[in-house]
């Protein structure tokens, strides 16, 4: 639960940063970097969960590994969204 709350708070913060970054001269890169930073945070959370899973056994270890896998998939989705958001910013500024 704490991870979900922290992730949500970080996502909102970085989304705001992405909007502000879009006003700069290197808009696309700034937006993509904001999303990449968020994805890196999520990847670190996944690594922490995997480390915890190493000290667990049975169903608890399986659940922790599943959580880590889900976090990694979320990080990938954030990166993909960042690329799309960067492309959208670039398309807006080139028109």
Image (cartoon, rainbow, N blue to C red):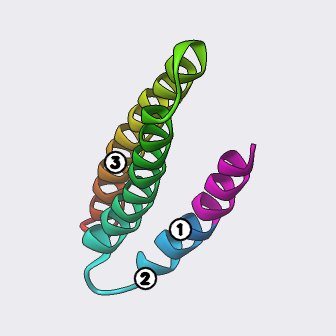
Q: CA distance from mark 2 to mark 3?
A: 20 Å
> First in sequence: mark 2 or mark 1?
1
x, y percent for residue 66: 49, 22
Instruction: Please check the rendered image and state whether residue 20 is part of the magenta-colored stretch, yes or no.
Output: no
Outermost residue on the bottom side: it is: 25
Q: Answer with left or right where residue 20 lies relative to residue 7.
A: left
Q: Provide the residue designation for mark 3.
A: 79
Q: Answer with left or right where residue 27 lies relative to residue 1.
A: left
Residue in the picture at 58% in, 13% down = 59
Q: Provide the residue designation for mark 2.
A: 23
Question: Does 61 appear above or below 51?
Answer: above
x, y percent for residue 49: 50, 41
Q: Provide the residue designation for mark 1.
A: 14
Residue in the picture at 42% in, 34% down = 54
Specify the principal SS of the magenta part.
helix
Front-lying residue, 71 or 91: 71
The magenta segment: 1-12
């Amino acid at each position: 639960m704490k991870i979900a709350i922290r992730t949500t708070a970080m996502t909102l913060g970085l989304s705001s940063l992405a909007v502000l970054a879009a006003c700069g001269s290197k808009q696309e890169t700034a937006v993509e970097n904001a999303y990449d930073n968020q994805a890196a945070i999520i990847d670190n959370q996944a690594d922490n969960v995997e480390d915890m899973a190493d000290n667990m056994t049975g169903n608890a270890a399986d659940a922790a590994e599943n959580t880590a896998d889900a976090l990694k998939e979320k990080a990938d989705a954030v990166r993909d969204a960042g690329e799309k958001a960067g492309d959208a910013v670039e398309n807006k500024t080139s028109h």
